[in-house]
Amino acid sequence: MANTTVSSDLQVTKYLSDFFQEYIRNSRFSRYTGTGSNNVITIKEGRKKIEVPLVTRLKGNGVEGSATLRGNGEAIGNYGLTLTPTYYRHAVEFDKEELEKPNIDLMKAAKPLLMDWAKELQRDHIIEGMGAIYDGTTYANLGSSAAGANDTWNTNNQDRILYGAAKSNLSAGNHTTSLANVDTTTDKLDTGIVSLAKRMAQQADPHIRPLRNSEDEEAFIMFCDPYAFRDLKADTAIQQAQREGLQRGARFQPLMTGGDLLWDNVIIREIPEIADFIDGTSGTNGVWGGNATADGLNTAGDSSSRVGVCFLCGQQALSYGLGQRPMTKIDRLYDFEFQPGCAVELKHDIQKSYFNDKQHGMVTVFVSAAADS
């Protein structure tokens, strides 16, 4: 009886499919990423430019009874966001002795390293997107934006930026002064700030729509600086709520994993790498802190204290333009075929969703969050 052998090409195809699935799935943002609108991070696929449309809700009262409708209708507000996916690549290089192995084995050997690099790149681009500033002209990372651009962002988004425990901490048109109003006593992350940020999301115009689970319950997701998350865990109100929630079963467990907190239908998730953006000192680290062009969060608070940042998100807070799913390629020809290599190649553009100069699905929350001593 003849045995069936799986084609090496089919093995490679399955490998690439598994690689992409793992790349998307193994992320602290993966539960909130997908192609549908009921996601924090919405994926749109396209090779070059990708247009993400927004049609705003109707705000008029309409007419009632026999009143004439013609002339009392309402124009549709519609805006667009353009994503331009860019290639990102990295490679693992082997020596001559690896040449005798088939392509699939080289891919398997390189997979852990390439997967880690691709996942970290995706994660960092998502975090960068969450902190991005748009002043009506230029889209920039929080750390590379000028003070004037930060002030314009502050002006355009007053209904969706919270500095500390009170809306009055926002100094209109002055991001620097607003950050300096965040003090180390009353402005640490606690349940009151979480609930205030949620109410701001509910009252914002345009609306910030919450996520819905299978039972049509609504929830927002807050991604947190780790030191802010530490302070929230120390809040006695959150400690009691978590104990009671475990006893009766939290309604949003399908959206949660171990370590997440739940308060007032807001799921709070710690993102440790946010601290790298504030406290790091080399490479791309510290771009929101010591390496920032203006308003470095490491010393932006009252008396030069550290300010952490959290992002309370609803639907479509970020747009993920997927130009090409990750592909693994083998190169056996380099250095007269002496040094084979295995590379990963992907193409994307991940941006905060801005429509009509407003961040679309997010409340940005700045809190006092001292690093561990």
Image (cartoon, grey):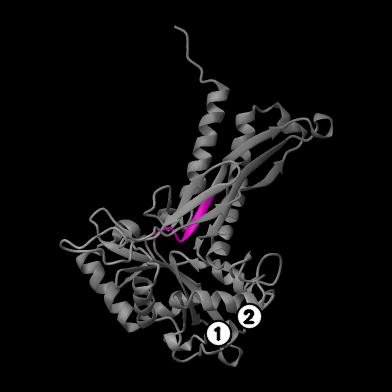
Residue 233, position as x, y percentages in the image? 39, 77
Please state, as top left, top right, bottom left or bottom right, where the N terminus lies in the image: top left
Q: Label 2: which residue?
A: 295
Question: Which residue shows up at 73% across the image and 38% down it?
Answer: 94
Q: Position of residue 253 (x, y in %)?
A: 29, 60
Near-viewer residue (199 or 326): 199
| Quadrant position of residue 344 | top right
Magenta residues?
Answer: 315-321
Image x and y of residue 359, in percent? 49, 67
Give whichever of 233, 222 is nearer the camera.
222
Tell me which label, 2 or 1, sits earlier in the chain: 1
Q: Are marks 2 and 1 in contact (CB under 8 Å)?
A: yes
Q: Residue at x 55, y 84 (%)?
A: 179
* Res 371 visible: no
Q: How many marks?
A: 2
Can you identify the residue that label 1 sits on?
Answer: 179
Callout 2 amino acid? Asp
Give yes or no for residue 160 being in the magenta stretch. no
- Left or right? Give the position of 147 relative to 122: right
SS type, badge 1:
helix
- In the image, is residue 158 above or below residue 180? above
What amino acid type should be assigned to the residue bearing mark 1?
Leu
Q: Residue at x 32, y 78 (%)?
A: 239
| 61 left or right, relative to 229 | left
x then y, percent, for residue 100: 70, 26
Viewport quadrant of the C terminus:
bottom right
